[in-house]
Amino acid sequence: MSPAADRSPLDVVLGVDAGTTSVKTTGFAVDGRAIAGAEVGYPLDEPHPGHAEQDPVAIDDALVRTIREAAAAVRQAEPAARIRGISLSTAMHGIAALDEHDAPLTALVTWADTRADEQAERLRAEHPELHDRTGTPIHPMAPLPKLVWFRAEQPETFAAARRWVGRKELALHRLTGEWVVDHSLASGMGLFSVRDLDWDPEALRVAGIEAGQLARPVPTTCVVGTLTADAARETGLPQDTPVVAGAGDGPLANLGVGAVRPGVAACSIGTSGALRLAVERPTVDRARRLFSYALEGHRWVTGGAINNGGVVLEWAGEALAPDLGAHAHDELLDLAAAVPAGSDGLVMLPYLLSERAPHWSATPRGAYVGLTRAHGRGHLIRAAVEGVCQQLALVLASMQEAGNRVDEIRATGGFARSPFWRQLLADVLGAPVGFAEGHEGSGFGAALLGMQALGLLDSIDAAADLVTIAETVEPDPETAERYAELLPFFASVYDALAPTFRDLRRFAPH
């Protein structure tokens, strides 16, 4: 770390991590210490099958509330602390329509929404090159297919929309009054040219919108402005407090665990999961299995996200072991640990919420294959968590096959509390996995990006030095070899069942 010489030892940046179901703001000192923070939750509404949306006003109210509470907590913990600025991490891929008065015409349609499944399938067949141009897989998570859905299914709303904005644009406007979006969030929309760092004309044509309906793209280290008078009053911060654009939660998760140097990948398993690698330029996977999102300057993040992480274990508890009660994660994993690696020939495709990488299709469904009378619920649970890790192993293989070197893996997420799951991940990936001490999450990454933007750090390379790896789990050679043998079978089951998944769609609720 090489902080600027004139900084105060109590300089603090508020890192805001606005996720899918809550926003958490933490004050970080420039030496990496977390001073204090606050968290506020909000609902994810699912009014129809496949719909996953939020109230744009409610999530912005939560944002300013958590900033206010975090700032107060920082002052209480460190009375001499000076809050130098705010930097934002937000969930990616959301989109909402605003009218000519900037009032919402729609809810914020989140990444988890699959209503644009048919539009994404058609775009993938008719315009596969858009993945290469924008770095965003053509999938219903992305705003591009969502816009095509709105144009087809809600033409009056589509025609009335003055702006189309996401979670980051709403937050920056609430704080500064500016309509801008950082390059990182823009690069996850399917509308942004990774070559030109501007809105892609062909993608806009396909979506049926104009560049003027989108926010102005800016670098992730851009100081967008200072707080408006209203935002200053709502947050309790001075009006001259600078606000840094920040980046998407996925790329910033890499920064938060110090995975910013070549060959260091970040793996996370929360409700969903991801495996990402920092690279020096936007990459194009010719097989179109990976995304390419901006982080900072010449630093990009490539990899893949999966829809099904901890949610699979939650389902297993509800469906297979309701007698254990809610949130009996330890008991479930104890049952799984009593079963041999490979679950005695039982494979589960864990696609309970369809799937993203590396297939990028909303049609897959969950499936057990190889089930016999000899299998008990321990086998079913172990096969489920093995399936989550095997899906991440497919992402890792895709990254390597695309020419990316992976020398080290750093992992975070709720699963990391379980020694069994930590060992399972190392065994299935066939590589050592390091677990960071503290500073898990995108909020720390946002704060580091803000420190660089505000001149408090020379470079975000400092992240690699600020993060301590508390434990490294080595794979068991024999078990890792068994999972390496099983992975091709796991992949082949998806290939074999893909036509069946498509046929089953007509029986599913809409």
Image (spheres, rainbow, N blue to C red):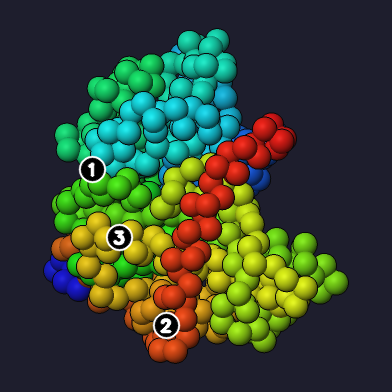
- Percent coordinates x, y for residue 492 in the rendering: 48, 59
Q: Which is nearer the N-term, disc 2 or disc 3?
A: 3
Question: According to the image, label 1 marks what residue?
Answer: 219
Q: Nearer the viewer, mark 3 or mark 1?
A: 3
Q: Residue at x 67, y 72 (%)?
A: 381
Q: Nearer the viewer, mark 1 or mark 2?
A: 2
Mark 1, other Cα within 10 Å: few <14 / some 14–19 / many ≥20: many
Secondary element at tag 1: loop
Query: Which quadrant of the structure image shows residue 145?
Result: top left
Location of the N terminus by quadrant is bottom left
Question: According to the image, label 3 marks what residue?
Answer: 399
Location of the C terminus by quadrant is top right
Q: Is residue 7 visible to us here?
A: no
Q: Front-most of 476 and 495?
A: 495
Mark linked to residue 156: none
Q: CA distance from mark 3 to mark 1?
A: 26 Å
Secondary element at tag 2: helix
Q: Front-most of 362 and 344?
A: 344
- Percent coordinates x, y for residue 146 in the rendering: 48, 29
Check whether the beta carbons of the residues at disc 2 and disc 3 lie within 8 A of each other. no
Q: Amino acid at mark 3?
A: Met
Q: Nearer the viewer, mark 2 or mark 3?
A: 2
Q: Which is nearer the N-term, disc 1 or disc 2?
A: 1
Q: Which is nearer the N-term, disc 3 or disc 1?
A: 1
Mark linked to residue 481: 2
